[in-house]
Image (spheres, rainbow, N blue to C red):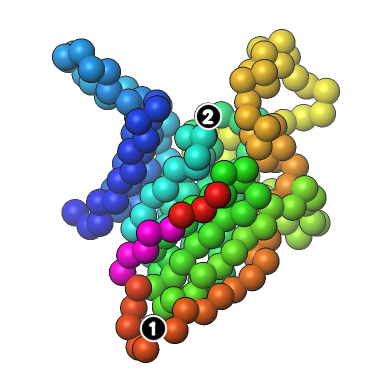
Amino acid sequence: MGSKPFAFHCRSFLAVGLQKKLKIFESPVREKVFAPLSLHKKLNNYHTEDIVRLEWSHDSRFIITCCKDRNVRIFSVHKIPGFIPFTLAGHKATPIMAAFTREHTHVFSLGKDGYMNIWKWVDEVSESFRKQQAFALQRFGKKLKVVEAEAGSEDEGQKEDLEYYSEFEKKVTKGRFVLEKKQRYELSGAKVLSLLLIVE
C-alpha cells in the first residue's frame, strides 16, 4: 500500500496522505453517526511520488507535505481564488519534516541528508514565478479546481468570504516563498529519520 503518513488537528480537520493522494476531512463529531468523516477536499493529482509527511500550519488553514520527489508543497484547506499550491524545490534528499512559523513568515524543511532549508515569504512575484504558476494552472488547474481571480471580478459572495480569510490567506496569491538559507547539520554519515521541530 506504500507509505501512509497522516496528520490530525483537533480544531476542525483531519488530513490523510496515502501514496500520492492527499485528502482532507472535517473532524469527526463526538456523537455516533453513520458516516463520521465528511470529505472536505481531495488532491489526487499533484504529487509525483509518495507523500512521507504532513504538517499543519498553526491556524489549520494550510497543510505542508513532504514528498519522495524531494519537494515540499503547501496547500490551502479552503478555496482561495487564484491560489496555486506552492512547490518548494531545493532538497537533494527526501524532506522528512517541514513547518510554518506562527505568522507564516518562514517555512523550515529538513531533508534526510541533514540539510535544513529556510524559506522566507516575500510580498512580490517575479516574472519567472508568474510563468511557473501559469504553467501549473494550465496543467493542474482543473484537477485542483482552481478559481482564477480577475481584477474587479469579485462578487458579493467572494467579498463576504474575504471577511473570514486570515491575513495570510488574503495575500497568499500576491507573494511567494524564496530560499533564504541552507544549513547543514553534521551527522557523521547517518541519515535523519525524525526531528522535533518547534517554531514560533
Q: Please give the label number shown on residue 23.
A: none
Q: Is residue 95 left or right of residue 177?
A: left
Look at the image and tell me whether residue 59 can be seen: yes
Q: Nearer the viewer, residue 7 or 76?
A: 7
Which of the two labelled residues, at mark 1 and mark 2, occupies the earlier sequence position? Answer: 2
Q: Which residue is mark 2?
A: 78
Q: Is residue 57 left or right of residue 2?
A: right
Q: Nearer the viewer, mark 1 or mark 2?
A: 1
Q: Is residue 140 above or below residue 90?
A: above
Query: Residue 43 falls in which quadrant of the image?
Result: top left
Q: Is residue 15 above or below residue 107?
A: above
- Write the residue at 63% across / 29% down: 166
The amino acid type of the residue labelled 1 equals Leu
Question: Where does the magenta region start and end?
Answer: 193-197
Which secondary structure type mostly characterizes the magenta part of the structure? loop
Q: Nearer the viewer, residue 187 or 174?
A: 187
Residue placed furthest toward the top: 156
Q: Is residue 179 above or below residue 148?
A: below
Q: Which residue is mark 1?
A: 187
Q: Position of residue 190 (x, y in %)?
A: 32, 83
Query: Residue 129 falls in which quadrant of the image?
Result: bottom right
Q: Position of residue 139 (x, y in %)?
A: 57, 48
